[in-house]
Amino acid sequence: MENWWRSTNACWLPVVEKYPTKSCKSGSCVNKKMPKTPIKMEETNNSRRAFLLTGLLAAGAMAGCNSGNHEVETGEAGTMKPTGKKVKLLSVDGDVIEVDEAYLKPVPELPSVSNQEARVGIDGKKFVMVIDLSRCKNLKKCQEACNHMHYVNPGQNWIKVYPMQESAHTAPYWQPTTCMHCDEPPCVKVCPVDATFKRKDGIVAIDSDRCVGCRFCMAACPYSTRVFNWSAPEIPEEVASRPYSCETSVPQKKGTVGKCDFCPDMARKGELPHCVSACPNGTFFFGDLNEDSVTNGAETFRFSDLIRDKGGYRLMEDMGTKPSVYYLPAVDRNFPFQPDAEDSISTSDSK
Amino acid sequence: MEKSPIANETIIRDLLPQKFGMRGKLWTALLICICLVGAYAYFLQLKDGLAVTHMRDYVSWGIYISNFVFFVAISLVGSLITAVLRLANVHWSTPLTRIAEMIAVGAIMFAALIIIVDMGRPERLYFLFLHGRVQSPIMWDVIVITTYFFISLLLLYYPLLPDLKIMLEHREQTDRKLNRLYSMLGSFWKGSSKQSRLSRRAIRILCITIIPVAFSIHTVTSWLFATTYRPGWDSTNFGAYFISGAFLVGAGSVLVAMYVFRRNYRLEKYITLRHFDNMGKIVVLLGLIYLYFNINEYLVPAFKMKRSEDALLTSLFAGDFAPYFWFAILAGMIVPILILVTRKGRRPMPSFIAGCLVVVGAWFKRYVIVTPTLLHPFLPMYNVPASFRHYFPSWQEWAIAMGSLAGALLIITLLSRIFPIIPIEETIKENNETHR
Amino acid sequence: MKRIDKCCHYGLLLLLLISGSTAPAQDSLKGDLNMTVGYVLENNQVPYVLAHVQTKVNRRFRPVTGIPIKLYLNSDSAANLVGQLLTDDQGKAASTIPGALAATWGKTDKHRFVAVFTGDEKFNPARAEATVSRAKIQIDTLPDKKIAVQIFEKKDSSWVPAKGVDVSISVKRFGANLNVNETATFSTDSTGTVTADFKRNNIPGDKNGNITIVARVDDNDQYGTLVLEKALPWGAPFVYKDDFQKRSLYATRNKAPIWLLFMSYFMAISVWGVLLWLIRNLFRIRKLGLTAQD
């Protein structure tokens, strides 16, 4: 137990969830810091203690999943065999309970999701984003956060904030534009090598280890959301040497395509994408369409209510791409539209 | 019009591959130099990534892709001259068939190479075979181009067999190394009736097969653009439009090659004024067809001026791209038609000029198809570096593009050095037949 | 333990040296930490103490990772050490309460938690305290889809209702929970109860229509954080379906549409069949030529 605290990613077991409970429908979500093996414990005499402990350890093992029909997997880092040495902890009522020491050792960072799992996606979810245009003030905090967390090349952005004005007499507004994660993605249709793919949870992801750099997807995307790594990305050494995952999209590789990924690594932890958390006005709402709920971190709404009451719409609906990003029109604004220094308002070609 | 019969021996002597003179050597050396510069530029591109080009996120496809389309277009000449005319039992085109096949082989090889050059990760080329998705138009393109390459090789090889025999019979007139090549390739050809029958049937089948494949390659290449939503590309017209353009540029390139070979190898007896006359008429016809498709392609959207197409069409007709667009239309179609529509215009020299205009105009036309559309995306170009907002190729791109053109010409040149430009045996046969 | 003590030793020494020898300007180079400590009880499982460390960067708070914190119960002494932790990438560190402190714990109903950071080269030392009374939370349902949440406080070995506590009642969802009606938080009345109408009709639940109601007291000054969940059958049944296995133009390579597979294979096989026949034909010609020699 000597130097356990030096490992930076140590997590305490049997701490169930350190932070607000995350939900996942069928137990196959992964909390990186929790082992995947079921933790069995010897039954103590006190049945209530046993109940509490089994409950909390199982919950700890499955990290917030509703226990029930969760799948039990053995994780590589987690062969949690009881050592036989017990440690005493205080339960909720102040009773002393005994937990095997093995379960208290910090668990090293688990390997991230495998390529196969990353290509299938998170079961049970259908991610959707709602962007409230009446709140966007072109602060570009979303861009900053996204570019920072994904080490996007300078000059490029995965989120673009456009000044939009459909025609001379219609209202101008700022439109943050992420990848639409279309349900019929034109980019996925044209990829020759399955480097970009549509997952179960609705996310369209890119595998930079597969991409051959033909850039057909960039030509096919009507929302101009994709960017290309024309040269080797300038990223710090420790980032460049991280193992690549389609879910983190880090590190980016030379000669491949990149785009907004709805932060699936955050979604697996039950957290919101970085842009959603970064916006000080709460412009971005993110959630699960299957749960009919979207949140910007501070406010949560029923998705259907929000779209119905505020007249939500999608971009370029007539293309038939079926995007997963909805926009709420810029009405009842608290602040007027202020053009940027860079461009005068340019008319967009299509809604 | 009766022509005096030419002795077989004369034919053979005239048509056997000749050594390069000073001009030939200089030409080859020039082409090799351009290729080497292109290779060096490619090495730089491999080292530093595609950033050495001036393609950026908006114009993500540049002159590599327009070169690719250009090559695929030219390669259709093989199917036109060799297959279509042969099947139509046209005999005057016989001298031109091998030229057409050589151009086709050279062009299709470099189409494949320039596409690999355009890839961001060329070392992952094998993924196309290991992980290929049949839903992707790029996979269709890979399959049909490979198929067409093999068909063109076969269509070059089969009619070559009788000529190989003739060349081997006259081996003292050719180089020793070349003789070894000839015997390796075709020493088994005896000219027996059985062999001739098999060969004739095979050539006929090849000619029939190559036509749908040729239509496929350029249709599929056009679908690389037509399967996207972009203004200027989102057109149902693209397959036919591209194929008609391909036939035109192929015929134009044959006009050029005819003139060059005729001049340099003194083939006036074989590539006669009649050939220029007929090819000229064919180019006029193809030019009119292509012009018709162009009118459909540009006039109809211009009538509607949909918002997404407004800015694009304006820039093509009267804006930044107007010089290129009008040059492609005028030089690529209208002027050659005007030249070749008169009898005097169909003489060798004016035909050659018209052919050159067609080819150069076609190259600019492909550029005008690829780049302007990419500069008119649906959502505004905003908050991007200045280099993203326009496109002019960098020297490395020019070097590589010119290198690929030089490479295709080099292949044609080498093929013309190794193999007789005009099919010897067929010429003898036809000569005998007309003067029987 | 020894190494930690040694480290703190050196840390302190360093602090002394620095503070003693340098001008005030150098001290101000070190950042200040904003540290909070709280008590969390979730779903009546093992409670834990949560420390949260942030620092102000450009007028915004940012989490600080890798800060070693010592947590104590009631007082700073080593005997009352709850745990020693490093903050994670969100600046948070949590620890359960070791059984050895059972005696101290059982003595009083109110507990004081102290978090101490002894400082390092980048940050000044910091300290945070919180006093919590033991409390528990209870969820009941009333007719007409009403939810009653009660908060009790432990006073002298009996549970008394806790008044004026802010409670949020919500449906458990992804990312953040959805309030059961428009009111964000309710305040408990004199009986420690809060009643809320469940207004989220037909909210999708699991395939049987079960949803989880979450009653939450968030960072209360007296009671810390209390969370309790309860499953109720008040949602609309939702059966998860997705098109992932369907054949389509945008599916993976092994799920191409049948018509496309048929067309492309048919064309490829027929053309290549012809080509292969032609190559075989060449070999026949060759054989004819070679045998004729004899």
Image (spheres, coloured by chain):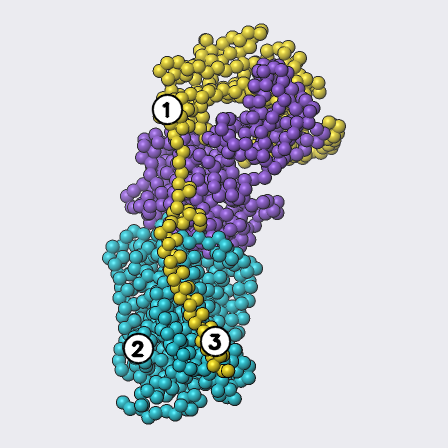
Q: Is residue B28 above or below residue B57?
A: below
- Residue under numbered circle 1: C200
Looking at this view, is A204 or C194 the one in front? A204
Q: Colour of chain A?
A: purple
* Cα–Cα span, label 3 and label 1: 84 Å
| Chain shaded cyan | B
Q: Is residue C54 above or below residue B305?
A: above
As helix, strand or loop, the secondary structure at mark 2 comes to loop
Callout 2: chain:
B
* Cα–Cα span, label 3 and label 2: 30 Å
As helix, strand or loop, the secondary structure at mark 3 comes to helix
Label 3: few (<14), some (14–19) or many (≥20) C-alpha neighbours in 10 Å: some
Q: Is residue A267 left or right of residue B240?
A: right
Q: Is residue A86 left or right of residue A351?
A: right
> Residue B216, labelled with which disc?
none
Label 2: few (<14), some (14–19) or many (≥20) C-alpha neighbours in 10 Å: few
Q: Colour of chain C?
A: yellow
> Residue B89, labelled with which disc?
2
As drawn, which residue projects farthest toward the left?
Answer: B303
- Residue under numbered circle 3: C287
